[in-house]
Image (cartoon, helix red, strand yellow):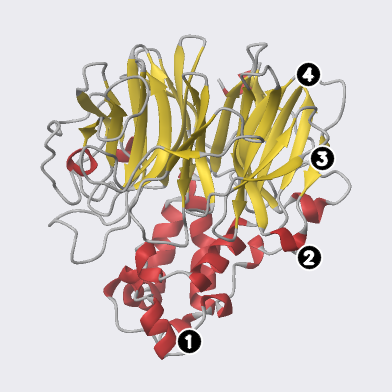
Amino acid sequence: MANAYKKITKINGFDSENSDNGRQNNYAWSMAELGDYLYVGTGRNLANIIQNALTTLDLGSLDLSSLGLTSANLKSINLNPSDIKLPKEFVPKKIHMGGEIWRYKKDNSCPWERVYKATEDSGIVGFRSMITYTTPKGETSLYACCFNMSSEILLLKSSDGIIWTLLNTGITTGTSSRSMIIHEGKIFMSVINEQSTDLSTFIYCNNDPEFEAWNLITPSEVYNNPRGQAVALCSFNGHLYAATALPYGFEVWRTENSEPEIHHWKCIVDKGAGDASNVIPLTMGIFKDHLYLGTAMHITKDEEVSIGSVPIRGFDLIRIDKSDNWNLIVGSRPLIPSHPTTGKRADPLSGYYSGFGEMGNALCWQLQEFNNEFYLTTFDWSILAEPLYAALLENKAKLSKLPENKTLKFLLNNQFIVKLFIKAQKHTYGFDLWKSKDGIHWNAVNVNGFGNPHNNGIRTLFISSEGTLYLGTSNLFEGCEVWIKE
């Protein structure tokens, strides 16, 4: 079935004139269309972004404390995350962090063209979400939300795809948005902050982002309002849905009415759908009168894991009906059993364990209906294990200074076992693409990154107005690719 897909990027990372620059476009982070063109916002040098984030964050908030990494003990041994060498496979010759936007004429009559490049000092390292929106005044434009290294939300706007205006939203509660959607004729945007452990929910709405202020619709009051960082939004069944990340398990909230109102939200999934290790609800999609939600893998701490469980495994998938009932579609026995008040975790209806039975499938990255079938894409970390482990060993002397930890000690002192495990995972290299005709029974379309094992994820699925399905990959080694379903 992979033969039904065609690559439309001749050069990875788009840039045919500078391959070193192109390989830094690791992620096809966002997609939208305007007129005759498809637009792709990139994520640049993701390994460096993570390294930079570790320099500024309380590392315990990233669940790296299971490796002995916290801001306190790093300071005590004078170890800075930026001193840790990245795998050479991820390091370009000349780093430039400025995010880029590229466009493609949908009739394939013109080559890929770069229409925006952020400056090095802008702090803009990519565009995590993008949307086409028509204001009440009738102006149709593209809006791209910047991933900004400072705690300030910036938007790019373009009405022609060539001239881009940088809009300062006045929002200082986060660094980027994973989700911008249209609900009841307005733009709704969830804001997250990678540099904070704040569990407040920040969802904003706007009628005209260039000329109107953004309105925060989620107050800090606890009573019947969402809590946790809002990762994903969806408009479904006449309501606005918000999936939020919490350290004791994700939650899903919906508005009681069509428009969001203070104290008029309802929690319909709680405590990680029966597994408190399900912290991050990554993506939502609609298929056959159900709302589906896919999670991100969570690496649990030694003291959290239930007896007999494996501390690393793939994503879970649940679905929610219009009466707020939810079922597990893909999933395993809970790592950290919880007791939701909104339902009960049972065996997966599909029969598949977490990650479709592959622990490398860390993320359920995209969910999209297309031609009466439901598509699911994954992020698979397997191809990253070998270079990351080599880098871990290269930094062994520095990491050995950290407080003793079971996980880190095992990784550093059992090289033969770890390398044997990595070798055993080679058959899983490359992203997975799955589809279903009913949302329960699933078939694998492709499990090897469309023949390129360095394609470790499909980050974007987008259906154009002409009815073409576009797929954008993540590739830390060579730069992202874009494919179409023929």
Name the residue at 29% across, 50% down: 246
Q: Earlier in the sequence, mark 2 or mark 1?
A: 2
Mark number displayed over residue 114? 3
Q: Earlier in the sequence, mark 4 or mark 3?
A: 4
The reply to whether discs 2 and 4 touch (Cβ–Cβ < 8 Å) is no
Q: CA distance from mark 2 to mark 4?
A: 34 Å
Q: Residues within 10 Å of mark 3 (few under 14, many from 20)?
A: some
Tell me the SS state at disc 3.
Answer: strand
Measuring from the top left, give residue 3's x and y in whole percent.
Answer: 63, 21
- The answer to whether 48 is drawn above or below residue 449 in the figure is below
* Displayed quadrant of residue 141: top right
Q: Which residue is mark 2?
A: 94
Name the residue at 82% across, 36% down: 163
Name the residue at 61% across, 36% down: 30
The amino acid on which the numbered mark 2 sits, given as a three-letter code, is: Lys
Frontmost of labels 3 and 2 is 3
Say left or right for 155 vs 230: right
Q: Earlier in the sequence, mark 3 or mark 1?
A: 3
Mark number displayed over residue 346? none
* Displayed quadrant of residue 270: top left
